[in-house]
Amino acid sequence: MRCSSVLPALILIWATPSLASEAEIKKGEDNWDGTVEFSASSATGNTENSVLGARFEAKRVLGRYSHDLKAAGDFTRTTKEVDGAKVTEETQNKWFGQYRLEVQTGDRTFAYGRARYERDVFSGYDGRAFVGGGMGHEIAIGDQFNWDVIAGPGIRHTVFIEPDSPDPEFKSEETEIAVFLGSEMDWHIRENVELEHDADATWTENNSTLESRLSLKTKITKTLSTRLAYQIKHETDPAEDREATDTQLKASVVLGF
């Protein structure tokens, strides 16, 4: 199983019509809801720095079925002067795409299937794919506060970037049985102000990944908002010559649809 083989599968799953019958679909439930956000910055002087970031989230509910899409990317280029010459290098290059299908099985319980592909050159892997499924529970449902948790098994496949120094024990690819835990919380603190927290944990025998994203969204108009987000990612056994923990603080503009 190679990471590149997951992309056609994601497209096929997304394009497959929902099994929900027309009788199950309520009026107003067949539209996409979501956000697109952008962030950018540029610095000049002793160091020239260009940062670009984007994130896309969309959800569609069809009766008992829910389709959830997420994608994001961050890219940074830095130019500095070395021995009188300007040298440009890439210092950040990461992105991911994810699809999740949920099927409501009870008042607050649901089954789900999840597929994700990501790439983070500076974390040491050229590609990482995860496919799995399990059960979820809606702990809290309301106008002001919502909290869902999910858990289930899966398979994770990683393609590593070869280290600069030769390593006879280096493995270019690795496939492992994994266990995934996830939490999504939304809290409407007051009118036009929303606190969101997403947390994921993917356990494997050799390396586990923990991710947390806390954001504060402030609505300016019906479709325009600002977001301040803090993200942390931790690998229990990172690739050689890589740090175990990455953090990112980002301000962005959000467009809703």
Image (cartoon, rainbow, N blue to C red):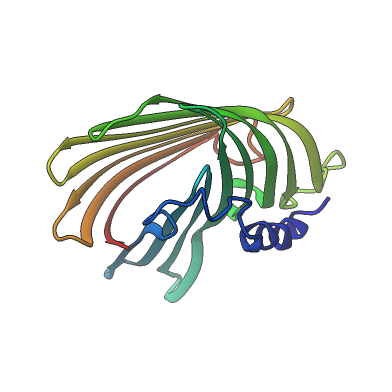
- The quadrant in which residue 224 appears is bottom left
Q: Is residue 87 above or below residue 18?
A: below
Name the residue nearer the viewer: 2 or 29.
29
Report the residue that reaches farthest toward the front.
Answer: 23
User: Residue drawn at (81%, 48%), measured in percent from left and top?
Assistant: 172
Where residue 77 appears, x then y in whole percent? 44, 66
Where residue 115 appears, x then y in whole percent? 64, 47
Q: Is residue 180 left or right of residue 1?
A: left
User: Residue drawn at (28%, 70%), measured in percent from left and top?
Assistant: 44
Name the residue nearer the viewer: 205 or 14.
14
User: Residue drawn at (80%, 54%), measured in percent from left and top?
Assistant: 2
Report the residue that reaches farthest toward the bottom.
Answer: 85
Q: Is residue 50 left or right of residue 9?
A: left
Quarter of the image where the C terminus is located: bottom left
Q: Is residue 199 above or below residue 219?
A: above
Whether residue 133 can be seen here: yes
Where residue 134 appears, x then y in whole percent? 64, 31
Q: Is residue 122 above or below residue 88?
A: above
Name the residue nearer the viewer: 54 or 27.
27
Where residue 191 appears, x then y in whole percent? 12, 42
User: Residue drawn at (67%, 40%), measured in percent from left and top?
Assistant: 239
Whether residue 180 can be seen here: no
Q: Is residue 57 left or right of residue 144?
A: right
